[in-house]
Amino acid sequence: MMKKTRQAHLWIGIITSAFLLMEAITGLIMTEPWLIGEGTRHTEMSMDRGAGGFNSQQGSGFDGDFQPPNNIGAEEGNMVPNGRMERGGAANSLMGIIRGLHEGRLGNMDISWVIDIAAVSMIFLTISGIYLSVKVLLRQRKAQKKQALKAESQS
């Protein structure tokens, strides 16, 4: 029973690691687009820090009249005529806190460096975990071949 549990853990870990690695890398690129030659996070697209609505800035892909699809974000704050959120609404809600964390903000503090460190750590841990798992699999295969040869020689 324990052997099957370890095998399941190994394979689930390898498969999940591939997705975790992808999420960590793409998340790091989203917060630091300069890593792939794009502009900085602050000039490409910035979120209104207190509300979760879009702000148009130089270099962003949005014009000043960007309208989000209907009903998106309506529950997090007060929509104003141009489709942006008013300050307040979402900032104090759970969704506002979650958005802030994903933008690298905790209240009024800039914690983007913490998010970057976490992403780099996840990338390192995932790659090293995959490497160690592959070593275990190769060792298991070698042991199985050795057992098969031993069984054949005894026959």
Image (cartoon, rainbow, N blue to C red):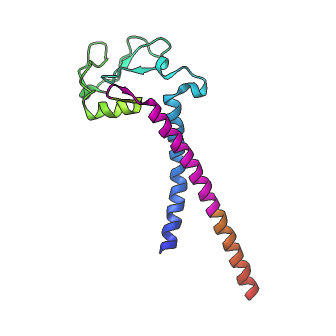
Seen in the picture, residue 80 relative to 92 is either above or below; the reply is above
Magenta part mainly helix, strand or loop?
Answer: helix
Seen in the picture, residue 53 relative to 125 is either above or below; the reply is above
Residue at point 69%, 69% (across, down): 142
Quadrant of residue 45 within the rendered picture: top left
* Residue closest to the eye, 135 or 5: 135
Residue 64 in percent (x, y) is at: 39, 10
Image-based side of 85 in relation to 5, left or right: left
Image-based side of 147 in relation to 96, left or right: right
* Residue closest to the eye, 137 or 15: 137
Residue 150 in percent (x, y) is at: 72, 82
Q: Is 122 part of what is drawn in magenta?
A: yes
Quadrant of residue 34 within the rendered picture: top right
Residue at the far bottom in the pictured view: 155
Range of residues picked out in magenta: 107-136
Residue at point 44%, 30% (across, down): 112
Image-based side of 58 in relation to 132, left or right: left
Residue 31 in percent (x, y) is at: 48, 29
Q: Is 150 part of what is drawn in magenta?
A: no
* Residue closest to the eye, 133 or 144: 133
Seen in the picture, residue 109 relative to 26 is either above or below; the reply is above
Residue 101 in percent (x, y) is at: 37, 33
